[in-house]
Image (spheres, rainbow, N blue to C red):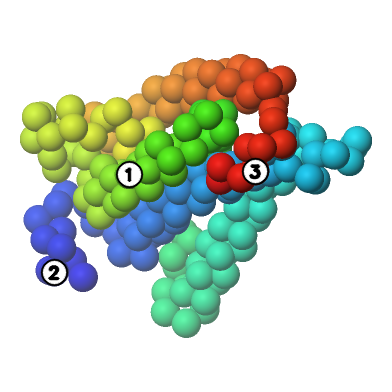
Amino acid sequence: MFSIMGLKGLALRGDFVIFLLTGIFMFMTHNKAVGAVLGSEGPSSAMMQHAPMNTFISIASGMLSVLYIQLIAIFFILFVYDVAMNPYVLTEIVDPAPVMGMLLLSWFSGGAVGLVLLAMKPWLPGLTSTLSNVYKRANMIASGKMFVANSLPSFMIAVFDWNPLFHTIDQARGFAFINYVPRNTNWEYVVYLSLTLLMIGLMGEFYTRKHASASWSARR
């Protein structure tokens, strides 16, 4: 795999499974969080007619279900890999807690992006679906899951550094590998961006909820 993807020349030495986990699982967690929030029950849903139910519960349950499934998958893969192939895989992760923090930040930022799209969905259902698909497809490359930011030329950094997932994946690899220090990313940007998108999404969702119409269900 190193040879096929041209990773042999990178100054990044360590277990390839850890390299994949810090990329692919954060990519999946982020994208699934976007999809879970976007696909949650809206204010015009029949479920919302029950008094204890509200959109916040629907959004939170979707996000928590994604996090639960992804954590179970990660622990299962690490357990099988540890038992069957490399019994020292967990000791090769330099700082496990910050790596987990980057996973949670990927999940949280995905939920924030999904919340903005959810607020737009009743007003522009076709455009929202297109934007969601474009964003998820763009993350296949723009997330940087199969390369490291330090290997990119400066003009390429400008192409990717808008993406919160690009920062969390690169930062996670900095915490996971002892000989890799991220120079072009920072996790603070993801925190600020996610909080900003969360506030915008909450305001949009609140406004949308106040103008909910039963006829919206026919537009989905």
Quadrant the N terminus occupies: bottom left
Q: Are marks 1 and 3 in contact (CB under 8 Å)?
A: no
* Above or below 87: residue 177: above
Q: Distance between the residues labelled 1 and 3?
A: 23 Å
Corner quadrant of residue 204: top right
Query: Element under label 1?
Result: helix
> Dot 2 corresponds to which residue?
4
- Going by the image, does 4 lie left or right of 64? left
In the picture as drawn, the residue positioned furthest to the bottom comes out as 84
Task: Residue at 52% x, 48% y: name it.
Answer: 35
- Which of the two discs, 1 and 3, labels the residue nearer the N terminus? 1
Q: How far apart are marks 2 and 1 (CA)?
A: 27 Å
Q: Nearer the viewer, mark 1 or mark 3?
A: 3
Query: Element under label 3?
Result: helix
Mark 1 residue crowding within 10 angstroms, few (<14) / some (14–19) / many (20+): few
The disc labelled 3 sits on which kind of residue?
A: Ser
- Which of the two discs, 3 and 2, labels the residue nearer the N terminus? 2
> Dot 3 corresponds to which residue?
217
Task: Residue at 27% x, 37% y: name it.
Answer: 181
Mark 2 residue crowding within 10 angstroms, few (<14) / some (14–19) / many (20+): few
Q: Nearer the viewer, mark 3 or mark 2?
A: 3
- Going by the image, does 30 lie left or right of 24? right
List x then y, in percent, for residue 104.
55, 41
Mark 3 residue crowding within 10 angstroms, few (<14) / some (14–19) / many (20+): few
Query: Element under label 2?
Result: loop
* Above or below 7: residue 191: above
List x then y, in percent, for residue 96.
50, 48
Q: How far apart are marks 3 and 2 (CA)?
A: 47 Å
> Dot 1 corresponds to which residue?
134
Q: Which mark is residue 169?
A: none
The disc labelled 2 sits on which kind of residue?
A: Ile
